[in-house]
Image (tube, rainbow, N blue to C red):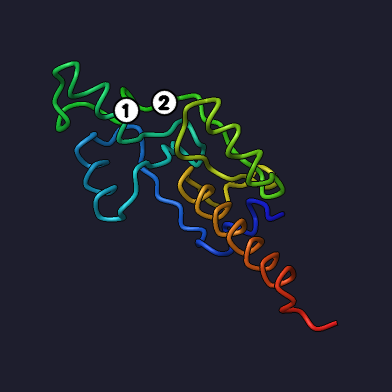
Amino acid sequence: MHNIANLLEAKGKDIWSIGPQETAFKALQTMAQKNVGALLVIDKGKLVGIFSERDYARKVILRGKSSKETTVGELMTPEVFYASPDDTLQESMALMTAKHIRHMPVYKDDRLIGMVTLGDVVRQIISEQKFTIKELEKYISGGYEI
């Protein structure tokens, strides 16, 4: 069974962030450029929240605010759940599902080392299941030489 460290090795460890004083508009531009659905909000080197497309949709559009005048700090989700590299994919998927989150930073020894999404985790689990099925089919059909 693979863990978050294996997933990060496969997908890369890019981390995209923004400051809480930046506008929601700037955050959306960055997210579009980087093709991501969330940015970590970092202030003075410390993670203070996460800003996602969901935050924008629920806290700007539905409240009639302007993305060019509203700061990320006003909209971000301050409670951030995170994973450790040793967490299994199943543990991470369970946490993300229980907390209704799609993006999770990964910390090792109090240091931010990456970010995973629910989609990343699900894709990896499916890939592992497909591999297991192929191996079992080979075994059952006599495809392995003993």
Q: Residue at x 74, y 70 (%)?
A: 139
Q: Residue furthest right?
A: 146
Badge 2: how crowded within 10 Å, few (<14), some, or many (20+)? Answer: some
Q: Residue at x 37, y 27 (%)?
A: 76
Q: Quadrant of the N terminus?
A: bottom right
Q: Residue at x 51, y 40 (%)?
A: 104
Where residue 89 sits in the image (x, y, percent)? Answer: 63, 46
Q: Which residue is mark 2?
A: 77
Q: Residue furthest bottom?
A: 145
User: Helix, strand, or loop for circle 1?
Assistant: helix
Where residue 54 sits in the image (x, y, percent)? Answer: 32, 30
Amino acid at pointer 2 = Thr
User: Helix, strand, or loop for circle 2?
Assistant: loop
Residue 141 disc label: none
Q: Which residue is mark 1?
A: 55
Q: Residue at x 24, y 50 (%)?
A: 32
Badge 1: how crowded within 10 Å, few (<14), some, or many (20+)? Answer: some
Q: Nearer the viewer, residue 6 or 110?
A: 6
